[in-house]
Amino acid sequence: MNNGKEAFMYYYRDKDAKEIDLVLEQDGELHPIEIKKSANPASEILRVFPVLDKLIFKRGNGAVICLKTELSRILIRKTTLFRSG
């Protein structure tokens, strides 16, 4: 998605209250993304991704974004490399 192509973003929720925080649609594929406040989310959150298989678009790769209160030393070093100014 870094090649200048536009992706459409959606939130998914069905009648059974199954939900996906973010669904990106690009090139005929749906990419499910869950966003969790926990640093260690349970693997059960991935069980909802297959609900997209019944739609007309193919399901592409998905992702889970987790929050962590402190950055590791490696992430701090990498972040410093990209800091401007």
Image (tube, rainbow, N blue to C red):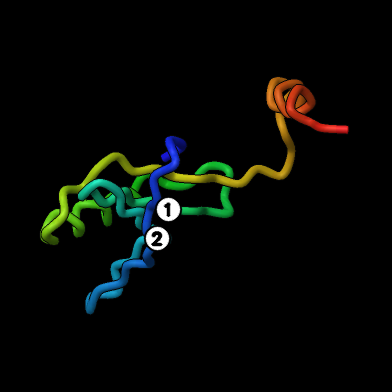
Judged from this view, the residue extending furthest toward the front is 4
At label 2, counting other C-alpha atoms closer than 10 Å, the crowd grade (few under 14, some 14-19, many 20 or more) is some
Q: Nearer the viewer, residue 42 or 50?
A: 50
Q: Secondary structure at mark 2?
A: strand
At horizontal 72% and vertical 34% (from top left) the residue drawn is: 71
Q: Which residue corresponds to mark 2?
A: 9
Residue density around tag 1, few if under 14, some if 14–19, many if 20 or more, within 10 Å:
some
Secondary structure found at label 1 = strand
Q: Position of residue 29 (x, y in %)?
A: 23, 48
What residue do we see at 25% from left, 46% from top? 27
| Cα–Cα gap, marks 2 and 1 | 13 Å
- Is residue 37 depicted above or below 61 in this figure? below
Measured as percent of width and height from the top left, residue 81 is found at 76, 22
Nearer-N-terminus badge (2/1): 2
Q: Residue at x 82, y 32 (%)?
A: 84
**Up-down: is 6 above or below 17?**
above
**Amino acid type, mark 1:** Glu
> 36 left or right of 22?
right
The part of the image, by quadrant, that contains residue 4 is top left
Q: Above or below — where is 47 with respect to 82?
A: below
**Residue bearing mark 1:** 34
Which mark, by number, is residue 12? Answer: none
Q: Furthest-bottom residue in view?
A: 15
Q: Residue at x 40, y 51 (%)?
A: 6
Q: Say which quadrant the N terminus sits in.
A: top left
Q: Is the C terminus in the top left, top right, bottom left or bottom right quadrant?
A: top right
- Numbered label tally: 2
Residue 61 image offset from top left, x and y in percent = 29, 39
- Mark 2 vs mark 1, foreground winner is 2
CB under 8 Å between callouts 2 and 1? no
Name the amino acid, label 2: Met
